[in-house]
Amino acid sequence: MQLVSFSDSVKDSKCKLLYLCRNLKDTFVSLRHYDNKLTHNEMGIQALEEVIEEAFDQFCRGVSSYGPYRDHVLDYYETSSVMPPEVLFLRYEEMMEKPGEQMKRMDDLLGFPFSEDEEANGGVDEILRLCSFDNLSNLEVNQTGKLWTGMENEFFFRKGDVGGWVNSLTPEMIERLDHTPEEKLGSSGLKL
């Protein structure tokens, strides 16, 4: 949800917000797979190559039913800089690389840091195991359950890998994605 979509009561409440950002290339690939599942499920059609090219162009231009990705990310990034007690900006890639470190940042945001006992007795590792992509994606509810809309819960899980874009994007797409964010992100310091 875009930050601007929150009501003033949420913005003024001092509630905690955790934003998880994913790199631009993996985001596009994941979004395409998700949209393809929805399209196939709802309309019974497969995505065609020309539709993928059109979707890529729209993504680069910021045209999306979820709003422009770069605007979305930049808004949370900048807000996390001015409101660090309330907003935590995490990167998916860093979370996958150093999950324990990132989980401790989340705990600090929420005000429930691990005790020395919990850390020494494997509490951090157990929570990481329970919250892992493999564990969550293999829960029965996520393999067989459905939302009220009829969409299957498994639609929300694919691979959970970092860097899968290398198998899906053409060199031209990579080049365009490498340069597109620069126009929007400017001097923010954010790298996608």
Image (cartoon, rainbow, N blue to C red):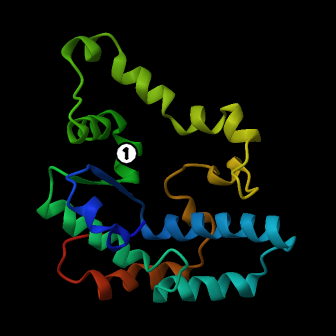
Residue lying at 20% horizontally and 66% vertically, measured from the top left: 79
Q: Is residue 111 above or below residue 90?
A: above
Q: Is residue 59 above or below residue 165?
A: below
Q: Is residue 79 left or right of residue 20?
A: left
Q: Residue 174 placed where, x, y %?
A: 50, 78
Q: Nearer the viewer, residue 41 or 104?
A: 41
Q: Is residue 92 visible?
A: yes
Side (left or right) of 20 relative to 15 = right
The quarter of the image holding the C terminus is bottom left
Rendering coords of residue 20 (x, y %): 38, 55
Residue 192 visible somewhere in the drawing: no
At x 71%, y 32%, the residue is 140
Residue under numbered circle 1: 95
Extreme residue in the right direction: 44
Residue 48 percent location from the top left of the image: 79, 81
45, 3: nearer the viewer: 3
Against 164, residue 124 (above or below) is: above
Residue at image x 27%, y 62%? 9
Q: Residues within 10 Å of mark 1 (few under 14, many from 20)?
A: some
| Image quarter in which the N terminus is found | bottom left
Q: Position of residue 36 (x, y in %)?
A: 72, 69
Instruction: Name the kind of residue labelled 1 in the image.
Output: Met
Q: Which residue is farthest front?
A: 9
**Secondary structure under badge 1?**
helix
Viewer-nearest residue: 163 or 76: 76
